Image (cartoon, rainbow, N blue to C red):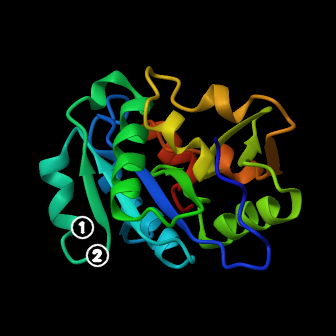
Amino acid sequence: MSAPPPSSAQPFRFGAVILAAGASTRMGSPKQLLEIDGRPLLIRAIDAALASPAWPVVVVLGAHAEKIRPVLARLPVLVAETPEWSEGMAASIRAGVTMLRQFSRALDGAVVALCDQPAFSAAVIAQLVAAQRTTGRSIVAAHYSGRNGAPALFLREHFPTLAHLTGEAGARTLLNGDPAHVAAVDLPALALDLDTPADVAAFRPTPP
């Protein structure tokens, strides 16, 4: 039996999972450490989560974990490593949600976010949470490029499903499922993710 959604009169307790396990093969170097305005891309994502009410913040590592861990050493985050990172996004979601559930049984939900979207921010998280409180939907997803995607907020009733996902698609089927369960927030700026050197050049044009 699924847990009922939290009452709007109660504080909404949610954690955050930041997916940062990919190999960055198209970038040619770990994009998690790519500096934008003087800060690594992953640190920008972590700072966004830490600036929100989300707690705890879990960072999922896989490829290049040995290079990334030192950057996280002084941050108040939990680090989950998945040796199955090459399977795809599902492995990272499994690892992150499993750690959240181990940390606290009192969470009402979780935001799952990527590390490579420069427009991800605490304000984006606030919009997702506000949409959940307004609509009562058990999933709230960012909507861009014609479909729902990350970041997304899941109520805890979906934690068992997230903890058993398989494959490269991650939670895409859940996010684009029954509209009776999924609310979408239009966030077109999140369509930009940094996967290749060309993406970086377009995002950060050379000064004239």
Q: In the image, residue 34 lies at what x, y percent?
A: 34, 54
Q: Tell me: 145 left or right of 98.
A: right
In the image, what residue occupies the spot 33% across and 56% down? 102
Tag 2 residue: 75
Tag 1 residue: 72
Comparing 100 with 141, the one in front is: 100
Whether residues under marks 1 and 2 lie with C-beta atoms below 8 angstroms apart, the answer is: yes
Q: Up-down: is 149 above or below 104?
A: above
Is any atom of residue 116 visible in this view? yes
Q: Which mark is residue 63?
A: none
Q: Tell me: 17 left or right of 152.
A: left
In the image, what residue occupies the spot 52% across and 44% down? 159
Comparing 27 with 59, the one in front is: 59
Q: In the image, residue 48 lies at what x, y percent?
A: 52, 70
In the image, what residue occupies the spot 29% across and 32% down? 85
Amino acid carrying label 2: it is Leu
Label 1 Cα neighbours within 10 Å, binned few <14 / some 14-19 / many ≥20: some
